[in-house]
Image (cartoon, rainbow, N blue to C red):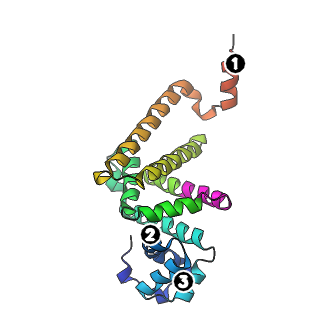
Amino acid sequence: MVETATLDYADMTLDELRVALAPEIAANAIFDGWSDTALVTAADAVGANADVARLAFPGGAMDMIDAWIVNIDLAMIDAFPAERIASLKIRERIRELIAYRLEAVTGLEESVRRATAIMAMPQNARRALKTGWRSADEMWRLAGDTATDYNHYTKRAILASIYAATLAVFVDDQSEGKQVSYAFLDRRIDGVMKFEKAKAQLLGGEREYFSISRFLGRLRYPTR
């Protein structure tokens, strides 16, 4: 993430301030939740104007959480130039990217837990899904995915679910070095890889034109 000591908050636009201040708010959310108190404390800590900071988060907690996730997305993109993972297999690339995100929030488990609870509220569900999709999309792009067919969507949906499930384990993981979380992540990725292999064998040369409804229909009414 960006070192806050090198930033001039007074010269930032609201969009820039939102992303730059988000990690500071996240650190305070451990104690104060994703609240105005956390926002003001964060602004004071870095010398930003608290009233201006409030203008950067008109949507309250969800704006703060979203900005924190954007900050992690941007840091991940900077940390993974193409040459860093070019020699890795796809599953290894995905694991490295998720591992980076877990490391980015290590020590902030309570902030993640509180953020997850807020995002799970019915009124926030749609935005939470959009946010998860965006991060999954960034990870797949960094991993080199160029799919434009239905795989583009299924890959992102599956990765978003893996990441969310791993985070759920991560926040309560008391094992040394978060070994339980990383083992859980590896099992989930292995499961998806096995599914993808089985799917490829099933679809064969027609994979780009695969229809779930047609497939289910054939199971019920086999062709003669």
Q: In the figure, 4 relative to 1: above or below? A: below
What number is the disc on residue 12?
none
Tell me which amino acid carries mark 3: Ala
Query: Pointers 2 and 1 in contact (CB under 8 A)?
Result: no
Picture coordinates of residue 73, whole percent (x, y): 46, 63
Tell me which amino acid carries mark 2: Ile
SS for callout 3: helix
Q: In the figure, 118 relative to 32: above or below? A: above
- Label 2 environment density (alpha carbons within 10 Å; few <14, some 14–19, many ≥20): some
For the C terminus, give its image quadrant: top right
For the N terminus, give its image quadrant: bottom left
Spatial distance from mark 1 to mark 3, Cα to Cα?
59 Å
Residue ID at (53%, 67%): 65
Q: In the figure, 54 relative to 216: above or below? A: below
Tell me which amino acid carries mark 1: Arg
What number is the disc on residue 53?
3
Spatial distance from mark 2 to mark 1, Cα to Cα?
53 Å
From the viewer's perspective, is 125 left or right of 35?
right
Spatial distance from mark 2 to mark 3, Cα to Cα?
19 Å
SS for callout 1: helix
Comparing labels 2 and 1, the label whose residue is closer to the camera: 2
* Magenta stretch contains residue 1: no
What number is the disc on residue 220?
1
* Magenta extent: 120-134
What number is the disc on residue 30?
2
- Label 1 environment density (alpha carbons within 10 Å; few <14, some 14–19, many ≥20): few
